[in-house]
Image: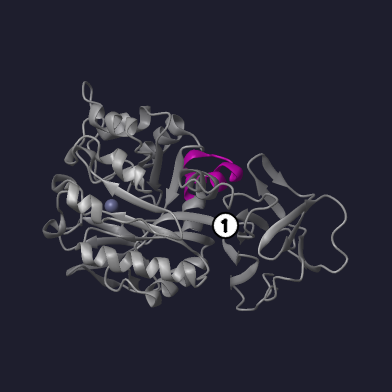
Amino acid sequence: MIRDTDTPTALINARVVTPDGVRDDLAVCLRQGRIEALATSGIPDDADVIDLLGRYLLPGFVDVQVNGGGGVLFNDAPTMDSLRMMTRAHAAFGTTAMLATLISDDLEVVERGREAVDAAIAAGLPGLLGLHIEGPFINEARRGVHDAAKIRALTAPVLEQLRPLEHGPTLITVAPECLEPGMVRRLVERGFTVSAGHSAATGAELVAAIDEGLSGITHLFNAMSPLGSREPGMVGAALDSEAAYCGLIADGVHVSDTSVRIAWRCKGRDRMVLVTDAMPPVGTQLEHFELLGAKVSVVDGICRDERGALAGSCLDMASAVRNIRRITGCSLSDAAVMASTTPAAFLGITGERGAIATGLAADFAILDYDLRPVATIIGGRTAWTASGGTRPV
Ligand SMILES: [Zn+2]
């Protein structure tokens, strides 16, 4: 496994994680990069049979917020090489589809990032799904570690310059209170998926943006107006919305366990999106890195700048899955939905990925009994194994 995707492959003896529970009785048949069948009996005679020895087979993780990994920050070098390093680093944690993410930067950097992602997808880089433009159209009052000098207004001429990818989904995070009425709608019309974040919006301002087509909340609770008594703020309006998908950094640091459980009860698995907000150290032993000129230290897996502010995370998706189970007590199926199915729904690609179902991309995270990654398959090919071999087990 699995170099040649023309030969059918059958994954047997897996504990297959579906939205409806874990199934022990399914063989998952792959051909040409797709899931050809889920079989309870009879696999193709010519199939390469791979015994997964009772490991968990999850749909590959879809991470909509990846700033870096493998020692690389996408902002620093928005190139194909960076994307290769980032996808490779995150494949070791079950991520099969990521949105490379740019934090607030000059529009020329955003454009270079867009071109690099489009070119990499067109070239078939495994594990890359699209682009997330997080800023610069955000509220300075809630900028977190974003560089204040990069933040700018989204004027009509700038909006006309902004282009989404040609080859994949493009997510853009904006502070809705900093935009003229109608701009969220125009972004949606131009092909962007629009999310609110780094924002001091009132509840009413967020609701107005959702009415214009905004569909996401970027790292719920972090860098946004909190829930109050008479003013629900971003957090209150996001929790109250039945429509909005909420990204959540479940690293045990960015959001308290209590707040995570409140979000889980309000939003449920069909609106919660596990994200990493990952920085360069993921997949490395780095203890320091530079974030747009600021020195960031990694201590006990936590990234902080010299002011002590959280500067992204060292989280990986497999850890997020383990954490959300521990914090909420949710099932493994629920966690897999939040790590794959719901982010795919948020991006409008459930016909392509986000579940183990016939016809979808053959993207899988294979985890052991402790939910630690054993192997990752992207498009029917082995992308990473813990053993270093080419067969997943
Ligand atoms: Zn952010």
| Residue furthest left as drawn | 149
Relative image position of residue 318 (x, y in whole percent): 51, 57
- Residue 290, picture quadrant: bottom left
Tell me which residue sits at (72%, 62%) in the image.
Answer: 30
Q: Where does residue 371 sit, x and y in percent of width and height?
A: 58, 56
* Residue 137 x, y percent position in the rendering: 21, 50
User: Looking at the figure, which quarter contains the C terminus?
Assistant: bottom right
Identity of the residue drawn at 64% across and 53% down: 360
Q: Classify mark 1: helix, strand or loop.
A: loop
Seen from the viewer's position, the closer of residues 254 and 359 is 359
- In the rendered image, residue 70 lying in the magenta stretch gets the answer no
Colour mode of the rendering: one colour
The kind of secondary structure the magenta stretch mainly shows is helix
Furthest-top residue in view?
Answer: 230
Specify whether 63 is left or right of 51.
left
Range shown magenta? 323-337
Expressed as whole percent of the image width and height from the top left, the position of residue 233 reads: 24, 31
Q: Which residue is mark 1?
A: 60
Give the class, few, some or many, for how many residues have Cα within 10 Å of label 1's Cα (few <14, many ≥20).
Answer: many
- Tell whether position 325 is magenta: yes
Image quadrant where residue 161 sits: bottom left
Q: Quadrant of the N terminus?
A: bottom right
Instruction: Work out whether residue 281 can be spotted.
Output: no
| Residue ID at (70%, 75%) | 4
Task: Tell me the amino acid under the disc marked 1.
Answer: Gly
In the image: residue 353, left or right of residue 25: left
Q: Is residue 143 above or below residue 210?
A: below
Regarding residue 246, the answer to whether it shows in the image is yes
